[in-house]
Image (cartoon, rainbow, N blue to C red):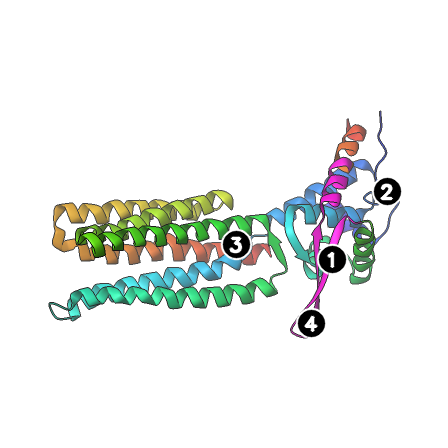
Amino acid sequence: MFKELDPLLHSQLRLAIMSLLITVEEADFVYLKKQSGATSGNLSVQIDKLSEAGYISVTKTFQGKMPRTICKITPKGIDAFETYVENLKTYIG
Amino acid sequence: MQEINNLNVLNMESKNFTEKESFSIINEMIDRARNNVQKINGHSFLLWGYSIALIAVMNYLLLYILPVGCKSQSFNVWWLTCVVCIIDAYSSRRIDRSTIVKSYIDRIISNIWLAHLISIICFLIIIFSLVLFWAKIEFTILITPTIMILTGLAEFSTAKVCRFKPFMYGAIYFWVGALLSFLMIIIDGSTFVLQFIILAVCMLIGFVIPTYKLNKLAEENV
């Protein structure tokens, strides 16, 4: 039986962000952009959506005069990601 | 990933992507993050590798240069490690601030070397207590071999954690070096000064060279 996939994670870029963040302790915007190959605008929008859902925590700091956005997956995000993968398995069989 | 790059899918909010594509994105991203070997620890390793090799050679030379009766003063050169500690702490903090990703592996490796440092400090406290309170000066000849054994242990653990074979070979150099140092004491006590040369060589071939290889790998991956 197919289980419903979390619509928030069933998006290519958001899924890519979550997959990257589950592997590392924390990563900044530049790293996520480089690894996902997304545009800054799109990445920023998707990070906001994940942050609003409580799946990731976002910390904004400054490195010298340059702003920095550091993202970290939350326990809620880890649960959601694991559930998504489990549900995904029902489709692949 | 070829598919992902070709379609440039990550720049779109496509609604029609299949479950198989989901899996391929997850696999690809996890794989990318795993392979992203960082140079963070590389700077620290090079600093310590060169510094210890240099200090060991300085100690060896001072043992010959200093007049009889003052030779034990040559060991004071090891206080320079405190300066190296401060430089390392300062530079690591700077690198830490500018690093764009922190992996769990980096944290594990840092903790391995922190444990290595604490172990050495505990060991030195024990040895110097024996010297100060019980006048057991002969125990000091164990310092270099023991430090080399502990360094081999930490390097072997690092090799296993980051799956980097040159560090494993480096660990073997340290263990062989430790046995060789001890063997020299058994054969002829006067040759114990060669411990410092063995330590310097181990630092260069067992630590510095593998670190350069790690940095090269990091540059290729990042």
Residue B70 seen by the camera:
yes
Amino acid carrying label 4: it is Met
Q: Looking at the image, is mark 1 or mark 4 nearer the viewer?
A: 1
Q: Do the residues indicated by labels 1 and 2 lie within the same chain of the protein?
A: yes
- Mark closer to the chain start, 1 or 4: 1
Q: CA distance from mark 4 to mark 2?
A: 34 Å
Reading the image, the residue beneath label 2 is A7
| Label 4 with label 2: CB-CB less than 8 Å | no
Q: Chain of mark 2?
A: A
Where residue B195 appears, as percent x and y from the top left, is 23, 54
Q: Looking at the image, is mark 3 or mark 2 nearer the viewer?
A: 2
Q: Chain of mark 3?
A: B
Q: Do the residues indicated by labels 1 and 4 lie within the same chain of the protein?
A: yes
Reading the image, the residue beneath label 1 is A58
Reading the image, the residue beneath label 3 is B217
First to last magenta residue range? A54-83
Which residue sits at x=32%, y=61%? Answer: B53
Quarter holding the N terminus of chain A is top right
Reading the image, the residue beneath label 4 is A66
Amino acid carrying label 1: it is Val
